[in-house]
């Protein structure tokens, strides 16, 4: 199950880390950019969190954070693409989510969601809309 902490990183003019942590049903962000830690701009209501990121062909960072709660319900996708956070198009529900992504000339995202019965399903993005993936258990 996705938990109360998730991290993502990238290298572009130095090492960049982002750590997303839940505390009292609030997800917050801590950032490392080459030489120091600071509080990031991200904040959302929730108890579970999964994060992923990728650099595109212009070395622009893209971050996705998937926020849910322990009791099930909607999982909200929060996106950073240039200079602000916004809610994305992902739709899913469950007790937590985790994600992985890559860029090979096109963006690929895989989000793994655990439902209240403990089953894990996959949602996929390959550049043009979310769809159900082949993974399940």
Image: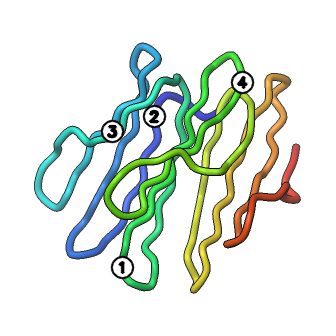
| Disc number for residue 59 | 1
As helix, strand or loop, the secondary structure at mark 2 comes to strand
Q: Quadrant of residue 68?
A: top right
Give the CA separation, mark 4 to mark 2.
19 Å
Q: How is the image coloured?
A: rainbow
Q: Which residue is mark 4?
A: 73
Residue drawn at 53 percent across, 35 percent down: 49
**Residue drawn 74% across and 33% down?**
93
Horizontal relation, residue 60 to residue 37: left or right: right
Task: Tell which of 35 and 27 is nearer to you.
Answer: 27
Cβ atoms under marks 3 and 1 closer than 8 Å: no
Q: Which residue is mark 2?
A: 5
Ranked by sequence position, the earlier of labels 3 and 4 is 3
**For the residues marked 1 and 4, what is the alpha-carbon distance in whole angstroms?**
35 Å
Q: If you read the primary sequence from the N terminus, does the residue marked by circle 3 or circle 1 appear first?
A: 3
Distance from Cα at disc 3 to Cα at disc 1: 22 Å
Q: Residues within 10 Å of mark 2 (few under 14, many from 20)?
A: some
Instruction: Give the vertical position of 24 relative to 60 (above or below).
Output: above
Q: Name the residue nearer the viewer: 77 or 25.
A: 77
* Labels 4 and 2: the sequence-earlier one: 2
Quick one: label 3 or label 2, which is nearer the N terminus?
A: 2
Q: Give the x, y percent position of residue 83.
A: 31, 58
Q: Is disc 4 placed on a helix, strand or loop? A: loop
**Residue 17 vs residue 7: left or right?**
left
From the image, tell me which residue sits under label 3.
29
Q: Residue at x 46, y 47 (%)?
A: 86
> Which one is in front in this view, the residue at disc 3 or the one at disc 4?
4
The answer to which of 127 and 14 lies nearer the viewer is 127
- Kindly indicate the quadrant of the structure image that contains residue 82: bottom left
């Amino acid at each position: 199950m996705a938990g109360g902490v998730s991290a993502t990183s990238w290298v572009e003019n130095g090492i960049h880390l982002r750590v997303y942590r839940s505390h009292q049903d609030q997800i917050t962000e801590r950032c490392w950019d080459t030489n120091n830690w600071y509080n990031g701009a991200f904040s959302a209501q929730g108890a579970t969190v999964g994060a992923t990121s990728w650099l595109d062909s212009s070395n622009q960072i893209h971050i996705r954070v998937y926020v849910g709660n322990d009791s099930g319900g909607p999982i909200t996708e929060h996106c950073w693409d240039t200079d602000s956070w916004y809610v994305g198009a992902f739709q899913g529900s469950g007790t937590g989510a985790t994600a992985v992504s890559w860029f090979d000339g096109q963006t690929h995202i895989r989000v793994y969601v655990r439902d209240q019965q403990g089953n894990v399903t996959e949602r996929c993005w390959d550049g043009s809309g979310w769809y159900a993936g082949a993974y399940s258990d």
